[in-house]
Image (cartoon, rainbow, N blue to C red):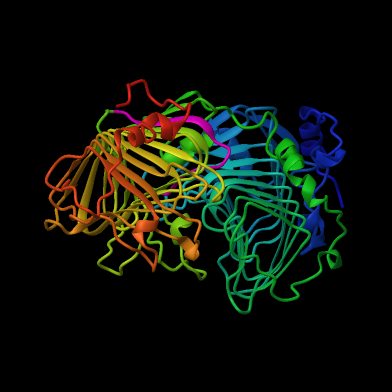
Amino acid sequence: MRLALAALAAFALLTPAPAHAEAVPSHAAPAEQADGFAGLSALGVDGTTGGAGGQTVTVDNQADLERYATAAEPYVIKVRGSIRIEPYGKEIAVASDKSIVGEGAGAEIVHGGFILDHVHNVIIRNLTIRDSYVPGDWDGKSKDYDGVQMDGAHHVWIDHNHFTRTGDGLLDIRKDSDYVTVSWNVFSDHNKAVGIGWTPNVVTKVTLHHNWFRGIYQRNPSIDNTEAAHLYNNYLQDAGLYGTMIRGRGRIVVENSYFQSVPDPIVSKDAISQVMQRGNVFSGTRGRVDNAGPAFEPSSYYAYTPDPAEQVPALVTRGAGPLGGQRPAPREITVALDGSGDFGSVQAAIGAAPRGAVITVKPGVYREIVRVWPGRRDLTIKGATGRAEDVVITYNLPAGGQKFYGGTYGSADSPTFSVLGSDITVEDVTLENAYDESVAPSQALAVRTVGDRIAFKGTRFLGNQDTYKADTPNRDVVSRAYLRDCYIEGDVDFIYGRGTAVFDNCVIKSVGAGFVTAASTSDSNTHGFLIVGSRLEGQVADKSIYLGRPWHPGNDPKAIAQVVVRDSWLGAHIQDAPWTDMGGFSWKDARFAEYRNTGPGAVVTADRPQLTDAQAAEYTVERYLGRWRPFTERHP
C-alpha cells in the first residue's frame, strides 16, 4: 500500500507523542497509513492515499477550501483555524484523490460539512466538524446537514476527527459506499452519530475502531445491509436509546469494545441480520446484547491486533479526536433557538459544559430528550426570564410505547428530562412529557432523577401518569432531590419511586382521578418523600384522590413506602381515608403519616396516622437532606 506521505507526515509532525502509561499501548499515536478496509487494494485503487503525490496547499477560508476540494487533480489540503461555512449547513463537495487535514490544534469546519458523492481515495483527518444543528429539530427531520456524507464513495479514511452537533447524522456512509475506515474519532453530544446503509444491496465493507461515542442518543453506529462491518476497540459511553445496531441482511462483528451506561448495547434488529460479538466489556448496561449468526471473520479480509477491551476507555479517551482535543465551552453558556446563543439545544450545552458551568436557556419550546449523564457534576440549568412558562423542554415518549426494534421504553428511556449525574440544579423551566394518554393509557415520565443532590427551584413538572420519578442507582443507594417553589401535576402515581425527595412550598395538582404518590422506599432508608409547606390542589371531584399507595416493584417485600405530608394545605379532592393498598400490599404496612395539615381535605380520621410533635422533629427538611443545603432560603 502506498503512503499518503504529505498529509500524514504533516499530521504526524503536529501531533505530540502521548505520555507513557502502562495501561495504554504506544500505538495510540496517529497511524501513518489507512488500516482496515480502507487500506485494501480493490476497485482499481491501491489502498487509501488521499492527495499523496499532489500539491500541498493551506486554506483558511471557504472559497479556497472549495476550490481545492473540488479540483480534478490530487491535493493535500491543510485547514488552518476555523472556517465558517455559508450558507448554514452546506456540505462542501470533495473530489477524488484528496487529503483534507487540519493544521495543528483548532482546525475546524463550523456550520457545514463535506459530501463525497461517488468519489474515491479521500482522507479527512484532524478536524472538528461542528454546529450545523437546526435549533428545534432534535429529530433531524427538517434538514440533512450531515458532518460527512458519503454516497457511493469508496476508499475513504475518516481519522482523528471530532464530530458534534450537526443538523442530522454526524457521519452517514450511504448507497453502497465501500472500503471505508473510521478510526480514532470522537462523536459527541448529538441524537444520531453514524448511519451506514440506505441501500438494498449488500456491498459495503467498513471498519470502525478506536472511536469514542459519547453522549449520543442512537446510531452508535446503526448499520444496514453491509457485507462486512467490523467494529473493534470502540468506547461507547452514555447512550440514550441503544448502542450498536445491525439491520437487514447486514453482517457485523463487534469485538473488544467497551460499553458504559448504554441501554441495549448490541441489537440485531431483523431475523436475517447477523452479529457476532466477542471480548466486549459491559459496564452499567442493561437490555439486549445480541449474538445472532456467524457473520464473518475479519481476519479473512485483513490482519489486525485488537487491544484488550479493559484498556479501551483509557486508550480511546487519550488518543481519539483531533490535535488539541475539544474546544472548551465557557462556564457561562447560553442556549437559544434563534441562533443568538452558544448552542441551539439544551442537550448539546450539557454535553459541552465544564464542571461548575451555568447554562441559561432563553425562551422557547425545546423539543428534545435531555440526559444529564452519569459523571456530570456541579451544573446549573436555568431559564433566562425567571418564569418557568417561558422555557419549555418537552417530548412525548410513553413508557409503554414500542421501540422501533422491539421492547418498550420503560421508565428509564421514556423521560423527557433525566438527571443521572449528581449536584445538578434546575431553575425556572418547564419539564413536560406531552404524550397524549387518550391514544393509549401509559406511564409518561416528564422527569427522572437518579443522581444525588438534585435541586429544582421554580420548575414546572407537567404530565399525567408517573410525571416525576425519584429514583436511585440501586435499592441500597440513597439519592436526594429537593424541589422548592415547584409545580407538579399529574393523575396516577405522579410522584413515585424509591429516592428521597422533599417538596418544599410546592403546588401539587391532580388533573385526573388517581393517586398523588407511589413510594417504593427501601426498608433501609428512613426518609422517602416529604411534602412540606405545600398546596395539594385538584381539578377533579371532591374526595376522589388518594395521597398515596405503597409500590413494591417486582413484589419486593423490602420496598416499604415512606411518605410524610406536613404543614400543607389539602384541597377537597383528597379522600378522608387518603392512603390505599397496592398490588396486594396493605398501606398499613407502609410508613405513611401527616402532621398539622389544613384545608378541606385535611380531616383527621382513624385512617390518617398523625405524627406527634416529638415524631415530627424527625421528619424535617434538614433530616431528609442531611448536611446538604441547596439554595439559601431558610427551610420551615
Q: Is residue 422 left or right of residue 580?
A: right
- Residue 373 sits inside the magenta stretch: yes
Q: Is 365 or 417 nearer to us in this picture?
A: 417
- Residue at the bottom extreme, as displayed: 271
The answer to whether any part of residue 310 appears in the image is yes
Residue 10 horizontal/vertical position (percent): 78, 32
The image quarter containing residue 384 is top left
Residue 158 horizontal/vertical position (percent): 69, 47
Q: How many marks?
A: 0
Q: Is residue 80 left or right of residue 276?
A: left
Dominant SS in magenta = strand
Q: Which residues are magenta?
A: 369-384
Residue 205 horizontal/vertical position (percent): 72, 64
The answer to whether any part of residue 338 appears in the image is no
Q: Residue at x 47, y 35 (%)?
A: 349
| Quarter the C terminus occupies | top left
Q: Residue at x 33, y 35 (%)?
A: 616
- Residue 546 sits inside the magenta stretch: no
- Identify whether 416 is placed above or below 391: below
The image quarter containing residue 544 is bottom left
Q: Is 448 or 245 nearer to us in this picture?
A: 448
- Identify whether 414 is placed above or below 311: below
Q: Is 491 or 478 nearer to us in this picture?
A: 478
Q: Is residue 7 left or right of residue 241?
A: right
Residue 70 horizontal/vertical position (percent): 61, 45
Q: Residue at x 51, y 56 (%)?
A: 558
